[in-house]
């Protein structure tokens, strides 16, 4: 495996308890060329923690002057990447960066342009889900597969990995969590892209532990899927 080919983009908002831990986990991977952290105007001291920490040269930190959402943070981060392969990493501890080792294989072997890390395809440890979260994710994935004639198992997963050329050709318009269905829709619309899934582990949080996405985001995700099925 070629070393240091992976650009990791990490949107951050109010994750003071986990941000340094997840940065450390990412940097332990030899394949990581750069970690691009985008603080989306955190209010809990996360930005101060980032500003006062000393990281190795692979870490690049950017700050939004106002909170704009995950999509806006990803847009900023994607504009800074230089690696051959790009992946999204949330700033909590729900996902383990060690999964990148398996996810990147279909890309390295020349079989895939995009790889999704699926929490729902089995084979890896899973913390028990909140029922309505899982039901909502299953429904949105089902709608995705109908709209785009696909067989994804986990449309809303954070772990989306792409060749840099893929993300260079996608213009992100969503500022909020709707970025997840937007990315998926625009990827699936391009029938030239080879898309794979690999199973990943998932250590989900509950709301007391800092989980931010709620059932209300499901309505926005549904509208986003339909909208980007019909237009760019």
Image: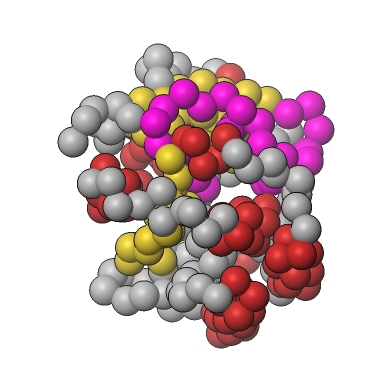
Taking the view exactly as shown, the residue that stands out farthest to the front is: 192
Q: Residue at x 26, y 74 (%)?
A: 123
Q: How many marks?
A: 0
Where residue 143 sits in the image (x, y, percent)?
A: 63, 79
The quarter of the displayed image where residue 142 is located: bottom right
Q: Nearer the viewer, residue 211 or 116?
A: 116
Taking the view exactly as shown, the residue that stands out farthest to the left is: 1
Q: Residue at x 60, y 80 (%)?
A: 146
Figure coloring: secondary structure
Where residue 104 sits in the image (x, y, percent)?
A: 31, 47
Name the side, left or right, on which 67 lies relative to 198.
right
Q: Nearer the viewer, residue 39 or 208?
A: 39
**Relative vertical location of residue 66 with respect to residue 150 in this rendering, above or below:** above
Q: Is residue 18 magenta?
A: no
The quarter of the displayed image where residue 197 is located: bottom left
Q: Using the rendered image of the protein, determine whether residue 118 is visible from the camera's viewpoint.
A: yes
Q: Nearer the viewer, residue 119 or 229?
A: 229
Where residue 130 sits in the image (x, y, percent)?
A: 55, 79
Q: Is residue 74 magenta?
A: yes
**Relative vertical location of residue 168 with respect to residue 88 in this rendering, above or below:** above
**Relative vertical location of residue 158 with respect to residue 140 in this rendering, above or below:** above
Where residue 218 sits in the image (x, y, percent)?
A: 72, 72
Name the side, left or right, on which 80 lies relative to 45.
left
Q: Residue at x 57, y 35 (%)?
A: 168
Name the side, left or right, on which 63 lies relative to 135.
right
Q: Using the rendered image of the protein, determine whether residue 127 is visible from the camera's viewpoint.
A: no
Q: Residue at x 76, y 45 (%)?
A: 173
* Span colored in magenta: 64-90
Name the side, left or right, on which 23 lies relative to 15.
left
| Quadrant placement of the N terminus | top left
């Amino acid at each position: 495996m070629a070393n240091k080919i992976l650009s990791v983009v990490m949107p951050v908002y109010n994750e003071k308890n986990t941000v340094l831990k997840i940065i450390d986990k990412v940097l332990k991977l030899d394949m990581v060329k750069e970690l691009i952290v985008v603080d989306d105007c955190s209010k809990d001291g996360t930005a101060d923690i980032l500003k006062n920490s000393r990281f190795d040269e692979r870490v690049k930190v950017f700050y939004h002057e106002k909170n704009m959402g995950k999509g806006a943070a990803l847009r900023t981060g994607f504009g800074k990447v230089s690696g051959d392969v790009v992946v999204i990493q949330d700033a909590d501890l729900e996902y383990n960066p060690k999964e990148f080792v398996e996810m990147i294989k279909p890309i390295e072997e020349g079989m895939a342009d995009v790889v999704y890390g699926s929490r729902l395809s089995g084979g890896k440890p899973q913390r028990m889900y909140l029922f309505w979260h899982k039901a909502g994710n299953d429904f949105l994935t089902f709608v995705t597969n109908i709209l785009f004639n696909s067989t994804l198992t986990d449309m809303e997963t954070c772990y989306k990995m792409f060749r840099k050329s893929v993300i260079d050709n996608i213009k992100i318009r969503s500022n909020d969590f709707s970025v997840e269905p937007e990315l998926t829709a625009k990827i699936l619309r391009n029938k030239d892209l080879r898309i794979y899934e690999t199973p990943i582990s998932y250590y989900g949080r509950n709301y007391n532990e800092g989980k931010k996405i709620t059932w209300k985001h499901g309505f926005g995700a549904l509208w986003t899927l339909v909208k980007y099925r019909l237009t760019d």
